[in-house]
Image: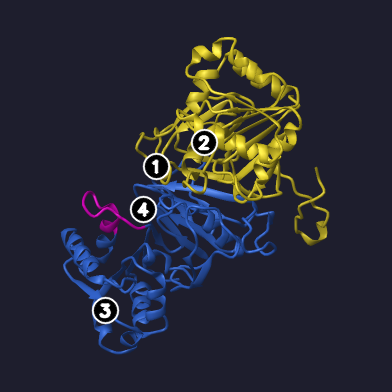
Chain colours: A blue, B yellow
Amino acid sequence: MPDGTLVIIGGHEDKQGERAILREVVQRVGDGRLVIATVASEQPEAYFDEYKRVFAELGATDVAELYLNDRAEALGCDKVRAFDGAAGVFFSGGDQLRISSQIGDTPIEQKVRQVFERGGVIAGTSAGASVMSDTMLVRGSSGESYRIGDLHMAAGLGLIRNVIIDQHFAERGRIGRLLGAVAQNPRQLGIGVDEDTAIVVDRHRFRVVGSGAVYIVDCNGVTYSNIAEASPERALSVYDVKLHVLSAGDRFDLSARRPVIDTRCPGTGTAVRNADEK
Amino acid sequence: MPDGTLVIIGGHEDKQGERAILREVVQRVGDGRLVIATVASEQPEAYFDEYKRVFAELGATDVAELYLNDRAEALGCDKVRAFDGAAGVFFSGGDQLRISSQIGDTPIEQKVRQVFERGGVIAGTSAGASVMSDTMLVRGSSGESYRIGDLHMAAGLGLIRNVIIDQHFAERGRIGRLLGAVAQNPRQLGIGVDEDTAIVVDRHRFRVVGSGAVYIVDCNGVTYSNIAEASPERALSVYDVKLHVLSAGDRFDLSARRPVIDTRCPGTGTAVRNADEK
């Protein structure tokens, strides 16, 4: 299992105030280089300038940009130099298919993976968050209930296994589409991340940072769904979903598929979070 | 237990096409009078004219309007005449507090309750849906995760017990606020109804009608929540919520707090809905 850290951000993270999420990224990069990958966007300039400024303010001394005009550049030798001495990679927002189609199975992707396996941090916001799983959500209506046949999935970077990540979660009313995605194969745990909210994943555990909530959709115990049976315009039915809502400081164990709670007070019947637990 | 039926609609029900939801109302009114209560709205005229037309097209022959300029009218004798021969009442949308504050504990409310207890239908859309429970949601942010202290509740008409109803559910991203409301007291089952979707409640069971989904939030098994502990601006944490998503034709047992499924195929391990079950 890689020694690195993932910082998976639901979009619109704070860039003016406390900046708790971006601070997590900088802390883990230390004196190493932070690569700001703007490949998800067609207009990367503004993204890079803003992130460069914020990361510098937070103490990142060595920041490099990775932008690709096309897949050919990812296959060449020039762009990999951005990763010299890299301890972290930050994927900005845009279109997750731009990331996967341009860097998937290229030397650039290998470099990203190396940073991760050697203990570095891979962070991503919005599209940069979705792309981290093996199977990713690429399109599906927000703000309505899931219509079977409405959802589009694709292969992601596979830095985190057996989860599907959705972003701008409460803000865009995406519980419906995440339920649809997870019901397709309950092996996958659905993780919906609000704006200005992130999960910081170390090995099989994560911790929540930021001002919003993180929704965990677990279809493992589902007793009925119509996902495979009904017509494409039909609304989804799915019974016995388990849902956890986590906020700042809460921890989750991806192996156990459970929030980390401590039952030091069994007599009271009340579960208490163990603030000391790492 | 009353013999009547509740038709609880998430707003924006179809008024042009198949009109499956409004048809349910008309079928149950039969030759009796249907009272269209526009008391939730400050501009009731357009509501009444449109519903009068649609209900007439669907076969309702006797339609009366109930509108109140103030609570004094609800306390008087004039307006109760609208209920002569009433077999159904339909509450249009607007503000649920207008309904409860104007008719709560008045002769008008008694008339509504009589229609229900004598086997009539009480229907309501949007605000008219929310007002049916004993405790109702009156305000709370949509499209974001629940902030403790953000939610406002009030006493509703109490035609259905131990539930909290929310409407325009997926469309306005309201899972966060419904979770917050239900976490306050898990005795209450949360029922989130999409637009153009309704639940038809007969005694302790309901059936789903319409094009969207109905979300059932059950906090009975919750192992941890921060609802009573954290500051008002804090995002909600709540672990081990049970969530069911139902669509047209699905049935739910409010006493058992379970979708109605049939396990006629126990050998297969697959639950099958019993389409024949009433």
Q: CA distance from mark 1 to mark 2?
A: 13 Å
* Residue holding disc 2: B183
Q: CA distance from mark 2 to mark 4?
A: 22 Å
Front residue (pair B88, A29): B88
Label 4: chain? Answer: A
Mainly helix, strand or loop, the magenta region?
loop
Amino acid type, mark 4: Glu
* SS under mark 4: loop
- Residue B32 screen position, x and y as percent: 74, 27
* SS under mark 3: helix
Dots 2, 4 in contact, CB < 8 A: no
Amino acid type, mark 2: Ala
Dots 3, 2 in contact, CB < 8 A: no
> Which of the two marks, 3 or 1, is nearer to us in this view?
1
Label 1: chain? Answer: B
* Residue holding disc 4: A195
Going from N to C along the chain, the mark reached first, 3 or 4, is: 3
Q: Which residues are magenta?
A: A11-24
- Which quadrant would the N terminus of chain A be assigned to in this image? bottom left
Amino acid type, mark 3: Phe
* Residue holding disc 1: B235
Going from N to C along the chain, the mark reached first, 1 or 2, is: 2
* Residue holding disc 3: A83
- Which of the labelled discs sits on residue A97, or is there none? none
- Residue A212 screen position, x and y as percent: 38, 47
Dots 3, 4 in contact, CB < 8 A: no
Residue A49 falls in image quadrant? bottom left
Against B46, residue A101 (above or below) is below
